Amino acid sequence: RKEAQKEAKRLEIERQKAAGTYVTAAQKRQQALALEKLRAAGYTVPAPRESGEDGDSEGVTKKSFVYVDEKTKAKQEEKKRRRLEKLGQLPVASEAPETSPEAPEAVVVAASEAPPTPSESIATTPEAAAAPEPLDDWEMADSGDEIKAPAAPQPAKKAGAVVKADSKDSEDDEESDEDSDDDDDSDEDSEEESESEEEEHRGQRETKEQVMERVKARIQKRKETASAKRSTDDLRSPEGEAGGITQQIGATEVPAEAIKERCKQVRGFLMEQMKIPGFLIIDTPGHESFSNLRTRGSSLCDFAILVVDIMHGLEPQTIESLKLLIKGKTPFVIALNKIDRLYEYDSNPRKDVYELLKSQKPRVQSEFKERMEKIVVEFAEQEINVTLSNSKNATDPDYVCMVPTSAMEGDGIGNLMAFIVNQTQTKYAQKLAYSEELDATVMEVKQIPGLGTTIDVILVNGTMRAGDVLVLTGTDGAIVTQVRELLMPKPLKEMRVKNDYVHYKEVKGARGVKVLAKNLEKVLAGLPVYITDREDEIDYLRQEADNQLANALHAIKKKPEGVYVQASTLGSLEALLDFLKSQKIPYSNVNIGPVHKKDVQKASAMKEHKAEYACILAFDVKIEREAQIFADHEGVKVFQADIIYHLQDAFLNYRKELKEKARRENEHLAIFPCKLRVLPNHVYNTRNPIVFGVSIEAGQVKRGTPICVPSKEGILLGTISSVQRNNEEVPLAKQGEECCIKIENTTGEAPRLYGRHFTHEDPLVSKITRESIDVCKTYFRDDLTKADWQLVVQLKKLLDIM
């Protein structure tokens, strides 16, 4: 049917071309526009007639019937009425009576013809006097009539120009409406015209790759421009309260005034030379995302404080943090904390800490020096040179400085702040310069009563505003959302107080801010935040956000065989993987977010390799109901816990149970290797069952072991049914021991006789097989010693086992 319609349309277009009445879509738009301009100027356009007098109905060419959807027609009329209203030329009902259904087609004005007099433009009959309603473009195309072009009135052109000059917006609206009407008419155009238009648009359109490249180049240029504008005269600072210390989202803001107040007693500190506007301190131990931020190489923190307990020295967690700082090449200072724990130490937080230490009793100074030197040695073991910040080596770049502090009493805090100020203003001033390019990271995803799901963001550089479009990394792909609110707690208020937040329209780095937006439930902590105000950048930033997660997961080294690990964030995933590595538990695959059916499918593939690894370790994530049902059906064990040690215990117990079960199922197939020598003075029964004493020259003897005589063509004597030592039944006897064994005839042949078929001079060995060797390797490897496995190799050659 479609082909028939196309053919009919093509024939109709050819007929119109032959008659000279064919009009293209562009010509139709020009005609309609000219007609509307005439009407807008207040001129009545006469209807054309092919022949005959005014009253001759035969002379009028009747148009063919066209069935129009009433709703579509009503919409078109409403559009025309609105256009006329905009131009201020809406005709009154008395002046423009309804047009007769058989009214002739509208006349298109041709600018090339001479303008008629006003009297000529007035119709003489009632039909001509009525202002005819212009037919739609598709009606004009269907009618097939030749369109005449009478002269256009001269004032019409002038009026049109005035309208265009005075109301350009109205013209734009009119053109947009005309374009929308023409879209409906495009179905009536020829195939040739449609194809040519498509080719024209295709030539103008960019490919997706070209758009991505253009967007990438624009973003890169923007970053370079922002980087070039950075100046040490404009250090990034939040526009916050200039009073006390403010507890922010995931961070603590210390303004310049508070720093000066704490540093005024420090010797050599010049307050008037202080440039930095304050500190934004992030307490990292509580933030699981910190490790991930360091590993991805991002510079979230400009300067770090490594806290070391002077009473205990370097602890495992401290060494781990130290390695992170060295790996990330982050500058840091060591806070030698808890000096108030020194015996008979006298505290004074309003004094320079080095002067305070000099004023202490000799025994206190001696203990401090002794403990400090011990810590210096511990750092030297980690290949780090450390010294006190007031020593002569403090300025040496090969040394890391230590500042004695007491967090409890406040001693040395001023010295610590002063040291950081001096270091950042001299060595790292360029790093602290403000940049317009956004640098922000999601620290935590939280559920807040009354607010819903929110994200805590550390805004290092740039500005974030309410209404900005964010692109974030989520567990199921990139998330595009709009900032509804930017919140921060009131100064010096507890964060636990509900709804006690201040709303901000915009926030400038460096600050911690709580962001309210839609669809934040699946956002991943520890990854960057992207902001855009251009629609064509969204796809590129989506791709960048997905790549961040893919790169982080891809960087994790996995084993061919191992458990499936699932965690809530990248930070917790890395912590869990490090722990599993230390416990020698391999992992074959990892993922972020809730456990879905697809995760169970991936984990079930391990059943073909090692059943004990066909399980999922879900750390701090929920398990979807569908996934749990599927796991039960597939035999995949899912362990869920919020504490790493609980997860480890559950898995190790499960692996132990599986191993014990497999051992029980394969115990009858496992044949331990042994080499025996008969004790001739302890032969108690020579025929079924054969009972005698033996000396174990190699291997292990246990019940169920088949015994053969290799020197007598490998004849099989039977299976050991009992092992006794000192008249007591024992499950196992090892190399170097002597015991009494009972051999039952299980061969199905005539029983063998001691003295006829073999003697005490013939060594006896266990009848191992290829299957029994494989079972021992798989389930009983730990039960056999290195000497036992060497005996297995000898027996393989002796019994011709491949």
Image (cartoon, rainbow, N blue to C red):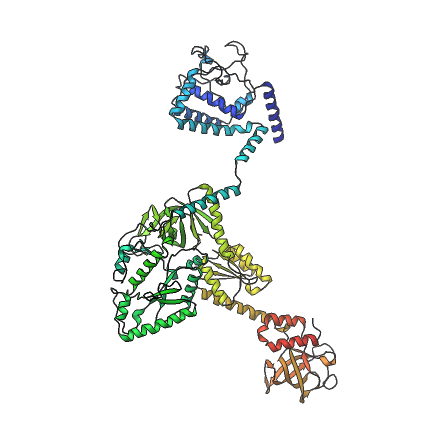
Give how far across and how far down residue 117 sits, in percent. Answer: 44, 11
Above or below 785: residue 336: above
Nearest the camera: 424 or 470? Answer: 424
Q: Quadrant of residue 468?
A: top left
* Whether residue 642 can be seen here: no
| For residue 732, above or below residue 46 | below
Pick the quarter of the image with the C terminus: bottom right
255 relative position to 777: left or right: left
Count of residue discs: 0
Please tell me in which quadrant of the rendered image residue 569 appears.
bottom left
Residue drawn 45% across the image and 66% down it: 645
Please give the name of the residue rendered at 55% of the width and 65% of the height, measured from the top-left corner.
612
Left or right: residue 703 versus residue 626 is right
Specify the quadrant that holds the N terminus.
Answer: top right
The answer to whether residue 692 is visible is yes
Question: Residue 226's x, y, as percent?
Answer: 40, 46
Seen from the viewer's position, the closer of residues 227 and 567 is: 227
